[in-house]
Amino acid sequence: MVSTTPTDQPRPARRGLLHTNPSVLWFMGLLGLFTLGVSILSEGMGIGVLSTSMVKILGMTLCLCLIAVCMDVVWGYCGILSLGHFAFFGLGGYAIGMWLMYARTEIVIRDSLSGATIPPTEVEITDAVTAQIFGVVGSSELPLIWSFAGSLPLQLAMVVLVPGLLALVFGWLAFRSRVTGVYLSILTQAMTLALSLYLFQNDTGLRGNNGLSGLQNIPGALHVPQSVLSMWFFWASAFALGAGYLLFAWVVSGKFGSVIKAIRDNEARVRFLGYNVEGYKLFVFALTAVVSGIAGALYYPQAGIINPAEIAPIASIYLAVWVAIGGRGRLYGAVIGAATVSLMSSWLTGGGAPNISFGNYRFLWTDWWLVVLGLGFVAVTLFFPKGIGGLFDYLVRKKP
């Protein structure tokens, strides 16, 4: 009789992504159907049921869903309550906005000077572009950070590099000092506040409170109607959300995901087992910052403008509320929370919801929307601590 040692036993088959995270297939299918439906109903590519402004709102909502997924990974899975991730989102928007504004202004300047008797030199064109962009803040010199603004490839690289490097530096300093819990949340909020206050100054090179505007006009596509451009960005946003969801589903489903969830539950024990806790946290923090920057680069050309108020700490707090409402620790929960709050905000504050009259008092949704959001957050926390996503889990797992 031949004895069988443990080494002779067949190894268990490695489970695939769809097996460990079945929500991926459902999410990708629903996202594909949603994208197809909007394309058919759109004004630019379909039968015209959905207006261009509505398509832009839906495209921006997809970008917000993507940063919500980033927030869910860093908070719901790794346990880092970051109150500064919207800063990375805004930096991505500024990076692409610099190219959009510079290139569009350069096209306008060249067209206006094309009929001049003496052709303008490149220096004169650069000076005219600088005066056009920075005249509003009383400057006539091109800031150093705009040195590559005329190059799309370099500015696209900045969309990734600037948020990623800031996250690496901040995370390395914070995690190596083993700052955790509420203290880390305060640090991330302080970073965001410092960045927004810095950008409010006119001498930062980013036009201070004026921000960057006219971002909906794409250089080289000025002849393309906004209805078509809105669909281009909607498709890009849908693709980015799908790719980001797949990426993070893969990250949180394997051994790496098990480690970061263990860090969330008991960081000291994971460190005692020999894992480089700081390295895992830094990787998650930097990766989510990079994807947040990409989401911002897609969001602000659809919004048309970006200013320092977009990076204020309150935006990151809203982001945490979205994830909590949707259900943290579930990627699809973050999407549900962000989409629900974003679309409700657009409906209630954009004139879609009728105001209510109580005798001499008129209830205006624009004044009370944030109160409604706060009450909704409190209600979800008290009665549905696992968020809306937790309700789906309950319905799916409930036995007949």
Image (cartoon, helix red, strand yellow):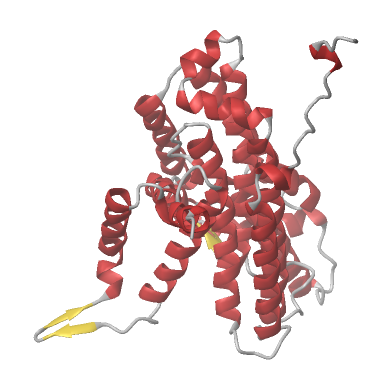
Which residue, as the protein is rendered here, is positioned at the far left?
360
Report x, y in % for residue 284. Answer: 60, 32
Q: Quadrant of the N terminus?
A: top right
Q: Nearer the viewer, residue 350 or 113?
A: 350
How many numbered marks have been drawn onto this rendered protein structure? 0
Residue, x 48% and y 37% (percent of image)? Answer: 75
Answer above or below: position of 20 versus 369.
Answer: above
Task: Tell whether 283 sits left or right of 377.
Answer: right
Residue, x 70% and y 64% (percent of image)? Answer: 29
Answer above or below: position of 27 versus 220.
Answer: above
Answer above or below: position of 217 versus 89.
Answer: below
Task: Tell whether 96 sits left or right of 389.
Answer: right
Which residue, as the protein is rendered here, is positioned at the far front?
1
Report x, y in % for residue 62. Answer: 59, 62
Q: Nearer the viewer, residue 73 or 354?
A: 73
Report x, y in % for residue 258. Answer: 60, 29
Q: Nearer the viewer, residue 362 or 239?
A: 239
Res 289 quadrant in image: top right
Report x, y in % for residue 278. Answer: 57, 18
Residue, x 56% and y 78% (percent of image)? Answer: 53
Q: Nearer the viewer, residue 386 or 159?
A: 386
Res 55 quadrant in image: bottom right
Is residue 52 at all visible to an observer of this figure?
A: yes
Answer above or below: position of 99 versus 340.
Answer: above
Is residue 217 at all visible to an observer of this figure?
A: no
Residue, x 55% and y 56% (percent of image)? Answer: 65
Which residue, as the protein is rendered here, is positioned at the far right?
2
